[in-house]
Image (spheres, rainbow, N blue to C red):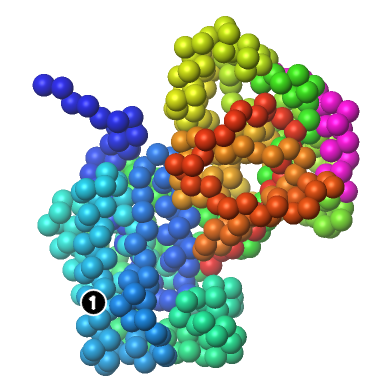
Amino acid sequence: MYVCLSFCSAWASYMTNSPTVIVMIGLPARGKTYMSKKLTRYLNWIGVPTKVFNLGVYRREAVKAYKSYDFFRHDNKEAMEIRKQCALVALEDVKGYLTEEAGQIAVFDATNTTRERRDLILDFGKENAFKVFFVESVCDDPEVIAANILEVKVSSPDYPERHRERVMDDFLKRIECYKVTYQPLDPDEYDKDLSFIKVENVGRRFLVNRVQDYIQSRIVYYLMNIQVHSHSLYLCRHGESNHNTEGRIGGDSELSPGGKQFAHALRGFIEEHKLSDLKVWTSQLRRTIQTAEELIVPYEQWKILNEIDAGVCEEMTYDMIQNSFPEEFALRDQDKYHYRYLGGESYQDLVQRLEPVIMELERQGNVLVICHQAVMRCLLYTLACDKVPRDPAPIRRNSYTPLSSHDQFKRPRLYSAGNRPWLPQRPTPSALQFPEMPEGVLQQSQVSVRNG
């Protein structure tokens, strides 16, 4: 008997021994959707197929026009029935994803504030042999709640008029409706046998209960590292190196005259934006260090930020690789993400290597990371995309890309000296077929990270 599995499915099965439903719990404006999306990106990034099922999307599909907080009153029987039916439809979609679409983890993003609703989900899990892990977000800090409402809910589809005062008033009343029936997890009695993490006041304290397996421990580890305040991350490719001018990959060459000119321009950018509290990280390769030295600020060197190891192909051009290793060149062209250079690394290896950096970036304040093309691709995808495309996108030279990691992907603005801004469409994984670019000069990205 022969069993054939795709590489991705085999890797996901290695990470999880049965499908898991992550169930969010908490009053509105407690950061559940933010945590859901961040967690989903992380799990997809490490190779575990994960998808968010946001109950608000189902509710808005069922009720086209939201009128007021009255819809969420516990004594509004008609609305309560609509909300229950939406939950059942969403759970059916969860089942389809985990049983028919090779999904491994589904994140059920809803308030789930009553034991009745949570018991329904537990029964659903037992019927389908899914593990259930709860994530409860508890927050009683009025400043955090107000900031979350203003930053996120004002732009919600529920409030198309975007009137700040009316949105705040209605949403606070919506929260009061949920408080009437809210039953927090009880770790001492009723819920003592459940697997969950309780996050209090956006990360000031955690309570973890009965973690059952490896993937649940990874979920806990990640949630305990999510940043609790707004901060900015700047991702920057090093200045052009001598190898870049020759079309060679890898190696440890110094900056070219053009690369030094760019490093000087980067210093002007930092001074112009008054980034005085900025931490600077580099790899241990000379081209990133020389770029940082021009800034005249302290910097830290990270070995795990070094460029992808091209093995026997280090310091070769792509033409040289094709002539010397034609079979390897063809294999890499077929699957850049999983292909491992002879004696070197694959993109998948690089993703695993970079995980400590991702965790540390979550906990830091404002950071400028001066790195390399492959490294920057991986960091950008985990910060701004739902999953790592199997054919990495090219990083433009001598330019920077402000991105947003808010609830929806925004089209990036690419700027370069002397060029007018260009607004590209978001690439889709199936469309990512690009010509090669020698590893090199610079792409600098600002990623504004919102928490709440």
Please tell me in which quadrant of the rendered image residue 262 appears: top right
In the foreground, 432 or 171: 432
Residue tagged by mark 1?
84
Q: Is residue 35 above or below residue 150?
A: above
Can residue 349 be seen by looking at this rendering?
no
Looking at the picture, how far across and down is residue 434, in whole percent? 57, 34
Residue 216 inside the magenta-drawn segment: no
Q: Quadrant of residue 236?
A: top right
- State the residue at coordinates (66%, 14%): 316
Whether residue 391 is situated above or below residue 97 in the rendered picture: above
Q: Position of residue 43 (x, y in %)?
A: 41, 46
Q: What span is colored magenta in the figure?
A: 250-268
Q: State the quadrant of the N terminus.
A: top left
Q: Which residue is depicted at the point 87% across and 43% down? A: 265
Give me the residue at 46% from left, 71% from top: 30
Q: In the rendered view, does 399 fall on the left or right side of 27?
A: right
350 horizontally vs 398: left or right: left
| Vertical placement of residue 352 versus 411, above or below | above
| Residue 5 visible in the displayed image | yes
> What predominant SS class does the magenta segment belong to?
helix
Under mark 1, the amino acid is Lys
Q: Residues within 10 Å of mark 1 (few under 14, many from 20)?
A: few
- Which one is in front, 134 or 127? 127
Relative image position of residue 317 (x, y in whole percent): 66, 16
Q: Nearer the viewer, residue 284 or 90?
A: 90
Which residue is painted at 84% across and 26% down in the image? Answer: 256
Question: Farthest residue toward the top?
Answer: 324
Quarter of image, res 71: bottom left
- Would residue 187 appear left or right of 66 to someone viewing this image? left
Under circle 1, the secondary element is helix
